[in-house]
Amino acid sequence: MASYHLTAKIGKKGKAAAHAAYIAREGKYSGRDRYEDLEATASGNMPEWAAHNAAHFWQAADEHERINGSVYREIEVALPRELTPAQRLELVQEFIEQEIGDKHAYQFAIHTPKAALEKDDQPHAHIMYSERIRDGIARDPKHYFKRYNAKNPEKGGAKKFSGGKSANELKAELLGLRERWATLQNTHLEKHGHNDRVDHRSLKDQGIDREPEKHLGAIGVSRLNAHAISALLERRAAEGELERAQREVCIIDLSGDLERAKAERLDESLKSYKPIFDAVDKKAAEEGHNEKERALIQEQAKELLIQNIESGVMPRINKKTRLEIDAIATLAQQSEERPIITPPQPAEKPERPKDKLAEQTLSRLIEEERLAWRKNEETRLLEEAEKSRQAAWKIKAKEPKKPLLGLYATDQWKTDVAFWERNLQDETDKHHERKKQAQDAIAGKSEKEHWHRVAFHEKAEQRLKTEHPELAKALLEQRQAEQQKAVLARAKATADKAADKAVAGFKALATKREGKFLGYGDSGKQWGALPDELKATIESFNKQPATARGVELERMRENFKCEPDAAEKLTQQLEQGKDRGVER
């Protein structure tokens, strides 16, 4: 269930660079199990001297901001577990665009640690930003954080947005920020088909009669025994059910008749889906169902829709377009999690050619094989990393104890310690290496993936034959047609080349005969060695005017392309004349 949390903090001088490294899991916070929860991080609106590395900005802020001034502000927000990592990133980026825009330099990070109590993901975001307002004036690091000069802005530092505001004004801004975050979060929950909503108001303002639960944190939870943890989780569950019931009563009914109110609320939901029911009825009529059968189909569709609304698959009120509903329905059918009403497609929509569909299906299967390999590789590497971690702990538990007396014993202890430290470091390094390899594998950066490309394709081809035999047949026919087309193209290219060669040889021979070159006069040996038919053709060609010869050569070339044998014959005759006319 989505929960609301937003806190705003102020960072003092000397704290910005360290905190930026902490949220980005950089420096001393990288490569440690405790901090391996980074889901996304980025920065923006940085001055030119820090655009390539946000750490330079925060280091400069720590160095040049005045001693009693605030260096940065931070907004920390809880993110819905219901959203995927990509959807959470989209939510955070839109919030930053809404609240910060292009006014302030900022850096954010999304963390997804495990909750200390429930052990579920606990996604949240840290958004750091400078109070200095960007005004388009280029300033170096020292100049950027100087006191603002109202008369000559270019001579002073960038202006701070909080300057001159009263405590009441700042409080009103914070309350507005909390409300805007709740609104935006609810918009994204609804956008992605979730019924849960968050409320920025206090429990008292929401009409919920209970005391807020005290935050325990990891250290506080570690001090609880199993019975206390179980009791706390049961209390949370009971309070959650009570609050949902109270909220439902407040929202849908003030008369006390909960059942009637629920019925009215359900009726409101079904009315919002009327376009879908109309489409189902129209499709049933087109398929020839009578009125009684259509009524039965409508009733079945209604039952399925109610199930999907109650389970949270479909929103209570339909505010989506037909295309969005189609996408949700298709996704749910593919996952085979729950039945969803799929609006009928227009009957006149033409089907895609089977060969194109086969190519798309094969590409999808290849991608599925690739993703499956990545997941399996990640799992394998994480298992190896866990084995190395456990091995490291076992080695750590066997740390050699320093002897009380004896020079020889002390020397032996030093040797044992060195050996112990090397083994411990080896297992620790192996653990981190496997963790890094697992991250690369799931991100598609593993070198091994390159060598499995052929295997992905072969497995996908086999799945296509098994799961979609008609598409496999269509793809085979398409490939055979492409191969035949390639054969014909190669044959044409060969014929064209032979025609060009024959025409070039004929033209060269005709030029030699016309100029009475050596060996090509009336009594020349090369000329005499040529077949009479060819000599007659050459003589006839040379009698034509120069303008007509080009046309004749092009006609010969086209004939040779259509009749490759004729081109081959002419080439052989030309070679034959050369051989016979040479004295040996």
Image (cartoon, grey):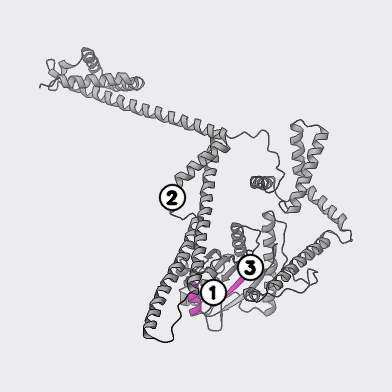
The answer to whether residue 188 is left or right of residue 72 is right
Quadrant of the image containing the C terminus: top left
Residue 552 at x, y = what percent? 30, 20
Mark 1 / mark 3, whichever is N-terminal: 1
Q: Mark 1 highlights which residue?
A: 19
Residue 488 position by quadrant: top left
Q: Secondary structure at mark 2?
A: helix
Quadrant of the image containing the N terminus: bottom right
Residue 187 at x, y = what percent? 69, 58
Label 1, label 3: how far apart the Cα atoms are: 21 Å
Query: Residue 450 bears which disc, if any?
Result: 2
Q: Mark 3 highlights which residue?
A: 115
Label 1, label 2: how far apart the Cα atoms are: 38 Å
Tell which residue pokes out farthest to the left in this image. 584
How many labels, in total?
3
Instruction: Identify which residue, 505 or 146, lies in the foreground.
Output: 505
The answer to whether residue 350 is left or right of residue 425 is right
